[in-house]
Image (cartoon, grey):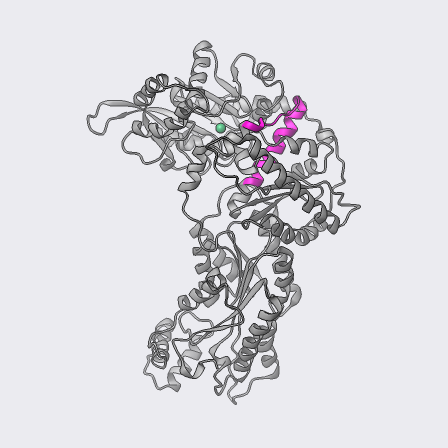
Amino acid sequence: MTGSTSDYLHVNYLWDDTTADALDPVERLRYRSNLLGADQRITNTGGGNTSSKIDMPDPITGEPVEVLWVKGSGGDLRTATRANFASLDLAKLRSLQALYDRTEPRGAKTPIEDAMVDLYRHATFNLNPAAGSIDTPLHGLLPARHVDHMHPTAVIAIAASRDQEALTREVFGGEVGWVPWQRPGFDLGLVMRAEAAKNPKLKGLVMGQHGLINWAEDDKACYALTLALIEKAARYVAARDKGAAAFGGSRYAPMEAQAREALLVQLLPRLRGLVSQQQRFIGTVHATDAVLAFVNSVDAPRLAELGTSCPDHFLRTKIKPLYVPWDPHTEDLAALIARLEAGLVQYRADYAAYYAACKRPTSPAMRDPNPTVILIPGLGLIAWGKTKSESRVTAEFYSLAIDVMRASEAISQYQGLPRQEAFDIEYWLLEEAKLKRMPAEKELARNVVVVIGAGSGIGKAVAQRVAREGAHVVCADLSVEAAQTTAEELLAQYGHGIGLAGTGVSGCGPALGLGVDITKRESVRALFDQVVLAYGGIDNVIVTAGIFVPPDRTGRIPDERWALTYAINVTGGYLVADEARALWQAQGLKGSLVLTTSVNGAVPKPGSLAYDTSKAAANHLVRELAIELAPLVRVNGLAPATVVEGSSMFPRERVISSLTKYAIAFDETESTEALRGKLAGFYAQRTLTKAPITLADQAEVAFLLSTGRFSKTTGQIISVDGGLAEAFLR
Ligand SMILES: [Zn+2]
């Protein structure tokens, strides 16, 4: 099995000579890494690393140097670029052993192990800023030119089985050795090098409770070997899979997809509130057939208690998930919530006990004791993280752990990482240092902001503004295309995040475009249902959708246009608030609502009777809602005036008619934006601040009203009108 796609049933052989041969040796490593990372069965998001030892000229002397290129700290193989690889002078890196050898104590988890990570930087070749990871010595100390370290499901299944050493022999014969679990570091590199020296025929090692490492002198051969070893393990597992009898068979019958979604819509806001008492979380629902088979099974509670195995998984999934026993066919939502509440109390107590039992004198303080993975029969897996990306990664990791457990239980008996070992990873001082180096969270991080009217104008500017502050943004608009365009622009700017999980809309990124007609309650409800399935709940709602109906030539507004004006500008805001209220109350978390009104609500003018009175009603709606939704939700109004720039309320015709009305000179050949500029300049002169009012001015205030900076302000209308004395509220 070395080069044809048909040789592999359980992994995809993707190597293409034409592509690879056009690349330099470092790019070939990047290429190999991307191919390996592209298959979840080979390694998880962010997991595993690869290396090549490449001869390169020293930048000063020109003398050849053997350089270790190895995936750096924090990178991801699937998406890695050249910049994600550290480069180290191999001789210098290996010379660190002298220092290591004369230090006492040394070995796994001694202080010198953590200190070594900083010393790797002294071996940096050619000032490459990418930092080496804790796995650097595994690659540097093994003699082969090319090394792949992966977290393949089928191999972890062997590595997490009770009789892992014997299974390794049985599956791989003598070509792959075995080393017991040991936290990665310099000592593990020495252990591996000794194994390879002892048995020159070895092509790789199964790493107990962890994964696979293997090597070759040629990069393409290393890639093919990685695949061949995984294929071998996967075939061994597949031949023994228990099918419907996996996990002890099923205890609960599956739910219909529609019923499952309907229940999740009810459950998720409540659940988000329960797990977010210390800090807010963003949710991901993952309900593949494999996940559902597990949560519905007889063995799920026993296996869930054992926790995950791969140290990578564990950092996100925590010591164990919360499994909630509940029969979707005989019990109702209230029973589930009661069971969840009790389960969470127990989980937090267990977590505190685990922390107390395992902590060391130098351990960081206990972190949020809430589970990040919740398993519910019929519903699947619900993961929580500080961002959408993190919750998707968490869901991915636990679903991979489910695959590992299924395979392990098919061939042997699954065992998790020992509790103290799990703790020593979760509270590893190196991890803590990494957390401390992370930039402070942005102002709207962990928040889900729904912007209605996000397809254009002020709404679009608001969506961009809150995204800049770390918000998860639902861009909603009457035009679903316009909403999706805004969301896609945000995703292009901020990325989709990582993590391969999320069923249906829950697989979304940090921005999502959805259609809504706020004049119809069912449409508003359908919008919020999607938001809940996507992110688990809502925090802030900002409505910028509105309509201005100009009078006809006789100065009149037809009755149906009058009604439409009220339906959008008044009833729409009410329906949005009324539907969001149920979610806010279910969560029990503070939220905010901003309705866009207008200075016209305070200043009567000829020719805009419907608009002006509707905005006056909207101003009072803000006050009424502030009373209705207190104390949980603050409600404020944003009252713009004459934002001409990029406004759908100022089409070319209206701009020209206004310019004519005010006797402002213009040329018919000028662009609409240029004409808008002239009109904006004219309007600016009527204000106290004498400057045109921009979309960004409006977006800034909508953003600020949504943040804690205005935590004591509710029921107020903030005018952003450049200063119009006649619009002063009194
Ligand atoms: Zn690993």
Residue 42 appears in the picture as rendered: no
* The one of 421 and 656 positioned closer to us in this rendering: 421
- Residue 457 picture location, percent across and down: 45, 67
* The one of 252 and 420 positioned closer to us in this rendering: 420
Is 17 situated left or right of 681 in this image?
right
The relative height of residue 684 versus residue 511 in the rendered view (above or below) is: below
* The one of 531 and 183 positioned closer to us in this rendering: 183
Q: Residue furthest right?
A: 330
Res. 124 image quadrant: top left
* Number of disc labels: 0
Q: What's the residue at 71%, 29% (across, down)?
A: 246
Q: Which residue lies furthest to the left in this view?
A: 61
Q: Give the range drawn in magenta.
A: 394-420
The relative height of residue 722 versus residue 395 in the rendered view (above or below) is: below
* The one of 227 and 495 positioned closer to us in this rendering: 495
Asked whether 236 falls inside the magenta stretch, the response is no
- Residue 548 picture location, percent across and down: 51, 77
Q: What's the residue at 63%, 59% (across, down)?
A: 583
Is 328 situated left or right of 86 in this image?
right
Asked whether 407 falls inside the magenta stretch, the response is yes
- Residue 180 picture location, percent across and down: 53, 19
Q: What's the residue at 63%, 63% (across, down)?
A: 581
Majority secondary structure in the magenta region = helix
Res. 526 image quadrant: bottom right
- Residue 59 picture location, percent across and down: 22, 29
Q: Residue furthest bottom?
A: 554
The relative height of residue 409 versus residue 385 in the rendered view (above or below) is: above
Residue 492 appears in the picture as rendered: yes
Is 92 situated left or right of 46 in this image?
left
